[in-house]
């Protein structure tokens, strides 16, 4: 458990900044694929709409450009699958980010000391049995470490794909 609520809010802020970094990588790829010679600068495309819309538009453009990269066919398929996986993982990350941002936080006290922090999504969800389910967790370092690791891995792999585009399409 992070030591105090301020630590939790700092960690949430770090996750948001990391998320925005990966989101911007998708935007950079989209800008490059839409206008590789930068004839319009600054680019106006990919600035509006939701993160989900941005990522899926970029994914479609990426899918269309793969045959132009001059890769062996089996490597094309590998790249296609990896990019699709990155999109799916980022979508799950987006949902996790939203859970952190749109949850209520409740201090759990023992005596006069804060002994934990509960995150609770204030929207009720329908469970498998049809009843209402409250998405909640008592926050710990593990709550943040997995998300931070995922942000780093997705960003790293996405940046490799971006650099490959820059090398092969210029």
Image: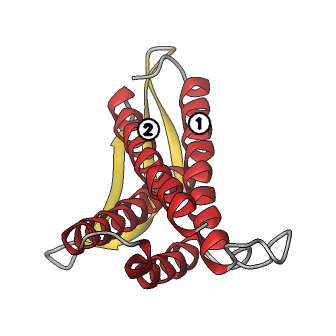
Residue with the most extreme left position: 129
Which tag, 1 or 2, sits closer to the chain's start?
A: 1
Q: Is residue 11 above or below residue 37?
A: above
How far apart are the alpha carbons under marks 1 and 2?
8 Å
Residue with the most extreme right position: 41
Q: How many marks?
A: 2
The picture places residue 133, in percent across and down from the top left corner, at 29, 65
Q: Secondary structure at mark 2?
A: helix
Identify the residue shown where x is 19% and y is 79%: 130
Is 82 on the left or on the right of 128, as rendered? right
Check the image and tell me how it is coloured: secondary structure
Is 59 on the left or on the right of 51, as rendered? left
Location of residue 9 (image quadrant)? top right
The picture places residue 15, in percent across and down from the top left corner, at 54, 42
The picture places residue 63, in percent across and down from the top left corner, at 41, 80
Identify the residue shown where x is 35% and y is 57%: 135
How many C-alpha atoms fall within 10 Å of the one at disc 2: few (<14), some, or many (≥20)? some
- Residue with the mark numbered 2: 148
Is 161 on the left or on the right of 18, as rendered? left
Work out which quarter of the rendered image holds the C terminus and state it. bottom right
Is 96 on the left or on the right of 13, as rendered? left
- Residue with the mark numbered 1: 14
The picture places residue 156, in percent across and down from the top left corner, at 44, 44
Q: Secondary structure at mark 1?
A: helix
Work out which quarter of the rendered image holds the N terminus and state it. top left
Considering depth in this image, is 38 or 110 the residue closer to the camera? 38
Identify the residue shown where x is 51% and y is 14%: 112
Q: Is residue 155 above or below residue 77?
A: above
Q: Are marks 1 and 2 in contact (CB under 8 Å)?
A: yes
How many C-alpha atoms fall within 10 Å of the one at disc 1: few (<14), some, or many (≥20)? some
Location of residue 29 (image quadrant)? bottom right
Identify the residue shown where x is 61% and y is 75%: 50
């Amino acid at each position: 458990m992070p030591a105090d609520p301020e630590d939790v809010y700092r960690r949430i802020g770090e996750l948001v900044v990391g998320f925005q970094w990966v989101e911007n990588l998708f935007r950079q790829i989209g800008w490059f694929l839409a206008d590789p010679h930068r004839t319009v600068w600054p680019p106006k495309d990919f600035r509006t709409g939701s993160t989900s819309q941005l990522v899926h538009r970029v994914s479609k453009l990426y899918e269309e450009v793969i045959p132009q990269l001059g890769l062996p066919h089996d490597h094309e398929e590998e790249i296609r699958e990896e990019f699709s996986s990155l999109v799916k993982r980022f979508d799950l990350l987006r949902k996790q980010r939203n859970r952190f941002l749109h949850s209520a936080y409740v201090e759990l006290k023992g005596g006069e000391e804060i002994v934990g922090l509960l995150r609770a999504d204030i929207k009720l969800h329908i469970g498998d049995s049809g009843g209402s389910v409250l998405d909640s967790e008592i926050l710990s370092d593990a709550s943040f470490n997995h998300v931070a690791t995922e942000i780093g891995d997705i960003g790293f792999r996405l940046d490799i794909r971006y650099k490959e585009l820059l090398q092969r399409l210029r």
